[in-house]
Image (cartoon, rainbow, N blue to C red):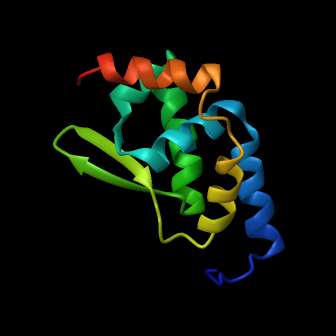
Amino acid sequence: MTVTAALSTEKLTETLKILYDPTRLLLMKLLTEKEYCVCELVGMFEVSQPAISQHLRKYKKAGLVYEERRGQWRYYRFNETCEQRALVEQILSQLDENDEQLVKLRTKAEAITC
């Protein structure tokens, strides 16, 4: 059993608010599995680039993701060293791997190239 530091009320509620949104919940699930380019996420979620960027900014501000720039592209992945790691992983473990929306997003991801 891994011992983790307890979160402050502010950090806990901030994280729960971020993951409360269905799109951000699914997006975080995907980012814990692998790194994605913004253009891939736009194609998968079928929303505008500014909408995806807004979700990612919230993650970044909370310390939940890493952003890496490669030329004109930005790639994001889950920050496995964030202090909310245990909370995020516990919440995401409750998401059914066969969830219709999650399966649809993963299928779309296979067909997208930047």
Which residue is painted at 64% across and 26% down in the image?
A: 99
* In this rendering, position of residue 20 left or right of residue 34: right
Q: Nearer the viewer, residue 78 or 1?
A: 1
Q: Nearer the viewer, residue 13 or 94?
A: 94
Which residue is painted at 65% across and 39% down in the image?
A: 25
Q: Nearer the viewer, residue 15 or 112?
A: 112
* In this rendering, position of residue 37 left or right of residue 84: left
Q: Where residue 86 sits in the image (x, y, percent)?
A: 64, 67
Q: Where residue 65 sits in the image (x, y, percent)?
A: 47, 56
Q: Where residue 96 sits in the image (x, y, percent)?
A: 67, 35
Considering the image in quadrants, where does the C terminus appear? top left
* In this rendering, position of residue 84 left or right of residue 10: left
Determine whether 74 is above or below 3 in the image: above
Determine whether 39 is above or below 35 in the image: above
Which residue is painted at 54% across and 58% down in the image?
A: 64
Determine whether 18 is above or below 83 in the image: above
Indicate the quadrant where residue 74 lies.
top left
Indicate the quadrant where residue 35 lies.
top left
Determine whether 19 is above or below 103 in the image: below
Considering the image in quadrants, where does the N terminus appear? bottom right
Which residue is painted at 71% across and 57% down in the image?
A: 15
In this view, the residue farthest toward the left is 71
Count all numbered tags in the image, as a single digit.
Answer: 0
